[in-house]
Image (cartoon, rainbow, N blue to C red):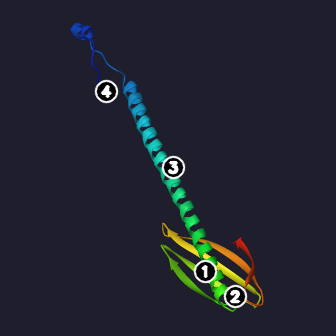
């Protein structure tokens, strides 16, 4: 039932004053729409915030995976500098990520592949770098060509 405070002059006259039920319905409908608007706006803002936060952290973790892959390439080059015939592969844990390193050596030319992996929100974020290394007859590194995969 919709009620409204009546002016004193109406009460004193003793007249009955009715407010149509359609006015009460419109008021209730306006309140429901206003509440719905604020709930939807709040949910939208929360969703945008969570998405932006996740995107920012995902970007940071992708950079971390890239740096791990770079470290893996450096490790492979160091192994080749110590032993010009080195070939092999292994997984190296570094901090909160890992580097999978693979060195394929065909005498004079080596292919070093490093994949940095970081886990973020149950997702594995990986970055892979391939380095082609030219070696001279004495095992010295002549050139290194790196590409992101």
Q: Can you give x and y, in whole percent of width and height, for residue 105 in the image?
A: 71, 89
Label whose residue precedes the other's in the sequence (4 or 1): 4
Q: Residue at x 46, y 38 (%)?
A: 37
Q: Which mark is residue 104?
A: 2
The quarter of the rendered structure image containing the N terminus is top left
| Residue depth check, mark 2 versus mark 3: number of the one nearer the observer | 2
Which quadrant holds residue 27?
A: top left
Task: Name the mark nearer the viewer: 4 or 1.
Answer: 1
- Using the image as rendered, state which of residue 99 and residue 70 is in the foreground: 70
Mark 2 or mark 3: whose residue is earlier in sequence: 3
Residue drawn where x is 53% and y is 53% of the image? 52
Give the crowd class for mark 3: few <14, some 14-19, many >=20 residues within 10 Å: few
CB under 8 Å between callouts 4 and 3?
no
Q: Is residue 95 left or right of residue 130?
A: left
Q: Tell us which disc is closer to us: 1 or 2.
A: 1
Front residue of this view, candidates 128 and 44: 128
State whether residue 17 is above or below residue 50. Answer: above
Earlier residue among tags 3 and 1? 3
Crowd around label 4: few <14 · some 14–19 · many ≥20 (10 Å): few
Quick one: label 1 or label 2, which is nearer the N terminus? 1
> Which residue matches tag 4?
2
Q: CA distance from mark 2 to mark 4?
A: 84 Å
Q: CA distance from mark 3 to mark 1?
A: 41 Å
Residue underneath mark 3:
48
């Amino acid at each position: 039932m919709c009620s409204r405070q009546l002016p004193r002059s109406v009460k004193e006259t003793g007249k009955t004053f009715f407010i149509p039920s359609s006015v009460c319905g419109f008021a209730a409908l306006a309140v429901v729409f206003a509440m719905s608007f604020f709930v939807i706006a709040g949910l939208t803002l929360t969703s945008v915030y969570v998405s932006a936060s996740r995107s920012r952290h995902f970007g940071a973790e992708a950079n971390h995976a890239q740096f791990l892959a770079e470290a893996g390439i450096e490790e492979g080059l160091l192994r080749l500098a110590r032993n010009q015939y080195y070939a092999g592969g292994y997984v190296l844990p570094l901090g909160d990520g890992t580097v999978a390193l693979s060195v394929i050596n065909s005498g004079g030319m080596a292919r070093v592949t490093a994949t940095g992996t970081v886990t973020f929100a149950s997702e594995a974020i990986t970055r892979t770098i391939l380095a082609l290394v030219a070696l001279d007859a004495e095992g010295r590194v002549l050139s290194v060509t790196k590409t992101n995969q």
